[in-house]
Image (cartoon, rainbow, N blue to C red):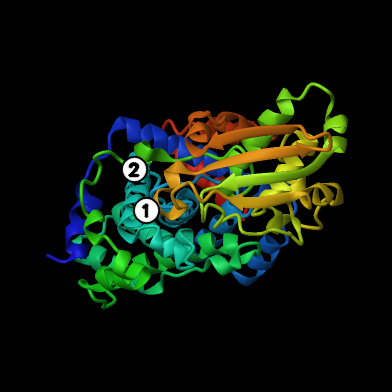
Amino acid sequence: MSLTAQLSQPIRLLQPDDAARQRAREGVQDFLAVSWPVLNRQVPDSGLPQLRALYADGGPASRALLLGYAGHALDYDDFHADFRGHPSVVILPALLAWAAENGAFDLARFLDAYIIGVEMAGRLGLAMTQHHYTLGYHNTASLGTLAAAAALARFSGADARQTAVLLGIAATQASGLRAQFGSAVKPLHAGFAAERAVRATQLALAGFDGQADGVLEAFIALGSAEAAQRDRLPENWGDPWRIVAPGLEFKPFATCAGTHSAAEATREIRQRWTGGVETLLSRIDRISVAFPPGGDIAASVRQPQNGIEARFSLEYVIAAMLIYGDLRMADFAEGEVNPQIMALAAKVARQPDDRAPPDALNPALRFHEVTLFLHDGATLRQRRTRQQSLATPVDVAGKLRAALSDQPELLAHSALRDDRDLRCLAQALIAAL
């Protein structure tokens, strides 16, 4: 049996449980919290107006692209460890655009399709292994196209043949390169993936001819080569559901997830210091940040030229946290970098820890150890692991309240209690485009 045929049954028929559906509600709420500030012009973003002009046809594929871009524009959206990417910002725009176009506001069916999409994302990430990302692909774009396609296959009620063709059409379009990080194309990757999933679904449901077998096998072989573990894609779907374990990781900061434990370690040093922040800053001679070899593959920017690139800079993130005690969105928005942060960032040096196993072997073991070397010879050191970061709850409700402070009705509908809530939420997002 082909890989596509093996996937068709769980995509179409497997029933998520209540725990997975509740996690899905939280994912929708987080997506709303990170996309609404861009859609509602609460933060500066020059890319969305340009895209609105270029994709003004009002069709579901264009709407999916715009929603995907808006959701990823701040780099504040959720992350999935197995996927090594951002699943919701691809899957939900495709589902929301499809629901609005077809008047399909069945909440249970919507949540189940979202869960299936995250399952596909996580299982595909395991099959492709970390090698896919290491080769230079942006998983959110490449693997995300297939995750959103699986979600739409479920949501649209595609039959087995349509599902197989749909996945094949999505796979033949799937791409996206990490070389675009630090530019507006990075969030556009999420939009492209959502758009491609919608187009693949439209083509498959219209009866367009495509290969039903062999395409996923070819995609995995090309995208991971000898490292591929393709048997991990169809195995054990829903046991556990990937949206529950390892689950969606919600972001506390609007920066690359690969910087977060470094930021938190720095914050702990700052909080322990009792002599005043200005005194601390004046005494710093140099700063080091250690991590497993290859642990900075995503946070690769050393000297950011703008706020967007700064999201991927360990140096800038550490300096910003030392100065302000937080990562302020204004310092990671479009425009020039903060010169005070840049001056301190120049004192930060990366020191990969060769005693630790390479990050590619097990990203779950990633850590950052930040050390401040003071002029008087004293040192201040703090180590923060990825697992410690994950164990610290993120206030998704707080993110949502901050984003919707002037939208009480939309905030109420974000609870997703029934079909009406879904309809109102989807229509509000589409209207904001």
Question: Which type of secondary structure does the marked residue at label 2 adopt?
Answer: loop
- Quadrant housing the N terminus: bottom left
Q: In the depicted view, which residue is nearer to us: 285 or 174?
A: 285
Q: State the mark number for residue 121.
A: 1
The residue at the point 60 percent across, 37 percent down is 252
Per the image, label 1 sits on a secondary structure element best described as: helix
Q: Residue furthest bottom?
A: 209
Q: Can you tell which mark lies on residue 242?
A: 2
Q: How many residues crowd around disc 2 within 10 Å: few (fewer than 14), some, or many (20 or more)?
A: many
- Give how far across and how far down residue 301 sits, in percent: 66, 59
Residue that sits furthest to the left in the current view: 1
Q: Nearer the viewer, residue 216 or 372?
A: 372
Q: Amino acid at mark 1?
A: Ala
Residue in the picture at 47% in, 58% down: 140
Crowding near the residue tagged with mark 1, few <14, some 14–19, many ≥20 C-alpha atoms within 10 Å: many
Q: Position of residue 160 (x, y in %)?
A: 19, 61
Mark 1 touches mark 2? (CB < 8 Å): yes
> Which residue type does callout 2 highlight?
Arg
Rendered view: 182 above or below 122:
below
